[in-house]
Image (cartoon, helix red, strand yellow):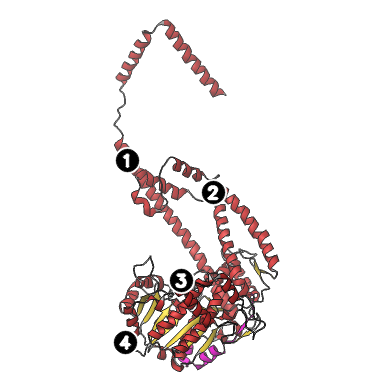
Amino acid sequence: MNVDQTLCDYNFFLTGASGFIGTVLLHRLLNIENASDCKIFCLLRSSKKYATVSERLSNEVLRQEIFGLSDEQICDLLLQKRVVGVEGELTEELLAIDDKAMAHMKYAHDVNHKKGIVVIHCAADIDFNREINQSININVNGTYQCIQVAHELNAKCFIHISTLYVNSREDGNSFVAEKIYDSGLNFVDEFQKWLKLRAENEQFSASYINRIKGVTSKQSPLQRQEWPNNYTFTKNMAENVVRHYCRLHSLSYSMIRLGIVSPILGGKHLGWFMGNGGFVFLVIGIATGNICYLNGNGQGRPDFVPVDYTCDTILGVTTATVLSKQQEIYQCGVIAADKEFSVSNCVQHAKPIWMSLDLPYCTDTAGLTFIQSKTLFYFVELILYEIPLFLLSCLSLLLSTVFSLYFWIKLYYQFTNQLYEIDLNNFKNLTLSEQIRSLQMILYDKPYAFVKRTDFMKKARAKLNWFNANYTYFVNQRWHFDHSNVKALYAALDNASQTKYDFDVNKIHFNKYANDAALVCFNKYIKYREEKKEAQIKFEQDLKHQLDMLIKQQQQERQTAAPQTRSLTKDEKLQILQVLRKLFGMLGLDIKLSLCIFVGMALIAAFSFAVL
């Protein structure tokens, strides 16, 4: 089975193209051999930042580093309609795609002589704490609308991207098969109820949600009653919806469950990552000593899966689905093949390597301690971090206000109605003196180093609290995700496809990958910090130059506006002195004595104050 030879005969409709997985997948689709005439339609929401979705596609997606495209090449892709932006909304009927765009997608294969169109649905809301009705709207209704569009397009097949953790209520040490587990609910019925309520501008009540989320399977007594978050709940519901409606429309489909998608595994883009996900944050936090404790025993086996491995698997699955029309579930994970991996083991593997590199911002004491008791963990966090940080925040507030010179200067400007502006884009409407005042505020109203460090620590703590709330549960589980279908799929590829689309789980040494990818991420973080410093220095130099020019301009205007003054000549000074003598001579003796006494006493008083 050859991936390129199969997929080059199809057009594609891709959702989630602006996301991490979608971007890499688009890059892979563009590199299919003999597919230069294939069309890739990308569903995108309209944006206030860009006039059209094509402009957004060009600036937000195609200019990403992994594409390596010049401006001219991007223009060619868009002009030749190799990549086409399709404006739509995931939660609206038929994705709110207009009739013209729908017809273009439906009949494009007649124009470029392809066999049809394939729909790959990557878009999803990964906010774990999204309100449940909103999450259903995006993750379940959005999937349902994609299926309806696929049916409307007479799509060759429908590929749904899911998560390994749809079955996260199963026992933490259990074997998780490539199948849909019974959850005790008929999710299709529940979704149809939700659709009916939505049509009446209603939604599931909080009490109803709590009731259905607490239902468990009678066939699985070890199944947990609580769902870890709304994301896993709605993704499980979405899988049931895919199975039901694809079968209803006789639409070939496959579902691919992904692990925690992490940076690129190999090649010149090793470590490339979009966003600020858990993997990158955790690495930087541990290396810099800002994360010292995690809740758990360190023996968890979270399934971090490289994004390039993920996208190669998606294309392999798409090929198999197009050819066989089978309805399969593929679990795309890598940890099951690495028996020795655990979070603690990975940290211990990386620590000596990092210490030997003498990296900036890293501390000699960097490391990770695992605390199993939640109560003890939160107590340690409270005593060592939260309380000290609260006190530091109070001190930081004082330094930023009472002990800050520019705090009082700003108050003075406010009470005296002297305008200033810290946004350079609003300078056009300011007078010359107001521009000078504004530049001085931008340049010199800087926080103390202590305040900056405290603000950084507060942001780091907020991210760590987010990590603890969202990922602690998953980091401490030891599920064994079966990937028999993925291994069989890879084995079915010919040599050329196995080389180009290498998703062989047995080749990944996860500790090495995690360490290498983390180093790349960390070095990018360092480079970002240095570039930011250099940019700030240049920015301030430009502002100082601009300020000097404005001050000179102000001085010139004052000199031009001031009246011309002439100093007195020597003769004029003598004349004035003679007039004063005559006036003094005209005074009576009493007045003269009184004046002399007053001047003498004034001189004595001035001398006394000077001595004191």
Tell me where residue 233 appears, x and y as whole percent. 56, 77
Which SS class for mark 1? helix
- Name the kind of residue labelled 2 in the image: Ser
Tell me where residue 90 appears, x and y as whole percent. 43, 75
Q: Earlier in the sequence, mark 1 or mark 2?
A: 2
Classify mark 3: residues with Cα within 10 Å, few (<14), some (14-19) or many (20+): few
Up-down: is 186 above or below 229? below
Which label belongs to residue 112?
4
- Name the kind of residue labelled 3 in the image: Asn
- The reply to whether discs 2 and 4 touch (Cβ–Cβ < 8 Å) is no
Front position in the image: 146 or 369: 146
Tell me where residue 28 appears, x and y as whole percent. 43, 81
Q: Which residues are the magenta region?
A: 476-498
Reply yes or no: does residue 480 show up in magenta. yes
Q: Label 2 belongs to which residue?
A: 400
Which label belongs to residue 21?
none
Reply yes or no: does residue 497 show up in magenta. yes
> Of discs 1 and 2, which sits in the foreground?
2
